[in-house]
Image (tube, rainbow, N blue to C red):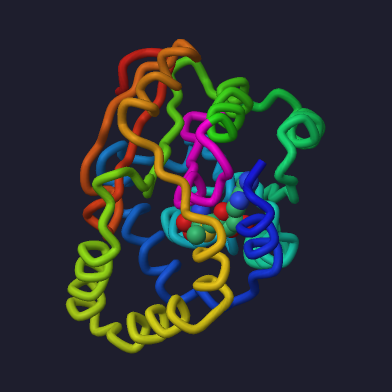
Amino acid sequence: MSSPGWDNFWKGQRKSFYAVMKMATGYFVSKVEKLYHLKPTDEIFDYGCGPGFVADSLARKKIRITGADINEFFIDECRKNHPGSLFTVITTDITTNQKILGEQLKGKQFDYIILLSVAQYLRAISDLEEIIKLLGAYMKPQGMIIVSDVLDENTSSIKDAFSLFTHCIRKGRIGAFAGFISYLMFSDYRTVSKQTKLLQVPEQAMRELAARNKLSCEKVHGLTIQKSRSNYILSFTPAK
Ligand SMILES: C[S@@+](CC[C@H](N)C(=O)[O-])C[C@H]1O[C@@H](n2cnc3c(N)ncnc32)[C@H](O)[C@@H]1O
């Protein structure tokens, strides 16, 4: 599914990204909460959940979620921090994931399925489509898939760094920003990104993908700190 570069990068990740990822994910959760008035009875599935920052943020509101990721270390962290919830190790192969989710989720259906900061690490838009198809089977008739932090031809790393910088200043977290930038500059992230470009998904491609799968597609602004990223709500019916 994802390119060998990003696939191996993410499988091998430990805690290097934590400070900024946690802040960015917390921001996303606060926006989604406000927009959709999430409640404890909502069923939420976080695909590519990482170390569980969505779960951490929502746990404060007594909302428990289900998650899946290709990184075993991240899933162990999720299980340790949320022992009452289901977190599953998946692979980058869609057929294998179909089987894993079929066994683990047992036909469960969700109000919200989150795909946050995952699309850019996939190899091709067709891989994203396979994932959306797979996740569609687990979405309630009135549910939605939130595909967030999507890069496209309008994404600018300078603009994104600036919006992250101003957010960090406002939150008094300039150290987190400095750590993040130095990590991007001097770590294996930089090496991998030179070999394997982050995947861009243009708006038109996202709309066509949705239409092929009989999903409606709404573009939503402002779910992420980085202002030049896009967010889409996919649903069987026009978004709530
Ligand atoms: C930037 S992190 C985002 C984590 C989490 N969604 C968040 O925003 O807090 C990217 C995540 O995508 C996961 N990932 C990468 N490729 C994936 C794939 N093909 N399928 C599922 N998850 C993947 C990584 O393991 C990592 O946890």
Q: Quadrant of ligand 1?
A: bottom right
Q: Give the range drawn in magenta.
A: 110-125
Q: Say which quadrant the C terminus sits in.
A: top left
Q: Say which quadrant the N terminus sits in.
A: top right
Residue 89: x and y in percent read: 75, 50
- The residue closer to the viewer here, 131 or 135, is 131
- The residue closer to the viewer here, 109 or 207, is 207
Residue 90: x and y in percent read: 73, 46
Looking at the image, residue 137 lies above or below residue 170:
above
Looking at the image, residue 57 lies above or below residue 166:
above
Residue at 63% x, 66% y: name it: 81
Residue 48: x and y in percent read: 58, 49
Left or right, 14 with respect to 233, comes to right
Residue at 44% x, 67% y: name it: 21
Left or right, 144 with respect to 191, comes to left
- The residue closer to the viewer here, 178 or 4, is 4
Residue 173 lies in the magenta stretch: no
Looking at the image, residue 170 lies above or below residue 123:
below
Residue 121 lies in the magenta stretch: yes
Looking at the image, residue 111 lies above or below residue 154:
above
- The residue closer to the viewer here, 87 or 233, is 233
Residue at 29% x, 26% y: name it: 218
Question: Quarter of the image holding residue 47?
Answer: top right
Residue at 49% x, 44% y: name it: 119
Residue found farthest to the bottom: 175
Question: Quarter of the image holding residue 102?
Answer: top right
Residue 88 in view = yes
